[in-house]
Amino acid sequence: MDAYRPDAWHDLAVATVGATAALTGLLFVAVSINLDRILAIPALPRRAAATLALLAGLLAAGVFVLVPGQPLPALAAELGGTGLLVAVGGVAELVRVPGGADSPRARHAAVLVLLPAGGLLAAAGSLALGTGGGLYWLAGSLVGGITATCLNAWVLLVEIQR
């Protein structure tokens, strides 16, 4: 079944690496153009950092799938470790916003990070067990993560101007 054959996911991984690299560039442009405004709103630097952490995690996941010939347990460990780092790093940044974890903005932003991180963890667990959907979890994580980073980049580039 293709869900457990990383070579069958090569094209998706290549597209993911390219898309996340482009979005990372967009994020840096958005932050640099609006740096004064971002720094004036205490929650936004942390939101930018969480978005960058998510992009780095998605990029890493794509690269890990592209490693030729590695055993599935190794890929599972890489995706699981990436999912944990994204979840812990992203949420740690977001709960330090004014109002803390109880802030509605922090909760919404945390969900945008946690859902893709959860998809990475589900893919890792499924690969390790050999059942449960395999890399199809990765596809959901990538779509959710890219959507979340686009929304955050939009806020940092456009909405901040309002």
Image (cartoon, rainbow, N blue to C red):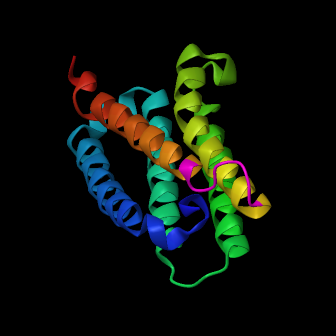
Front one among 97 and 16: 16
Q: Residue furthest right?
A: 129
Front one among 9 and 65: 9
Query: Do we see residue 48 in this rendering?
Result: no
Query: Magenta stretch: residue 133 in it?
Result: yes
| Position in image of residue 76 (x %, y %) | 69, 65
Question: For this view, does 61 lie left or right of residue 130?
Answer: left
Residue drawn at the location 38% of the way across and 34% of the way down: 152
Q: Is residue 13 above or below residue 107?
A: below
Question: For this view, does 96 lie left or right of residue 13?
Answer: right
Residue drawn at the location 57% of the way across and 14% of the way down: 104
Residue drawn at the location 31% of the way across and 33% of the way down: 156
Q: Give the main secondary structure, helix, strand or loop, of the magenta stretch.
A: loop
Question: For this view, does 30 lie left or right of residue 62?
Answer: left
Query: Magenta stretch: residue 160 in it?
Result: no
| Position in image of residue 12 (x %, y %) | 38, 60
- Location of the N terminus by quadrant is bottom right
Total tally of numbered discs in the picture = 0
Question: For this view, does 33 lie left or right of residue 104?
Answer: left
Residue drawn at the location 73% of the way across and 54% of the way down: 131
Q: Residue furthest front?
A: 1
Query: Do we see residue 32 in this rendering?
Result: yes
Q: Residue furthest bottom?
A: 69
| Position in image of residue 125 (x %, y %) | 74, 54
Residue 102 figure quarter: top right
Which stretch is magenta?
130-136
| Position in image of residue 33 (x %, y %) | 20, 42
- Location of the C terminus by quadrant is top left
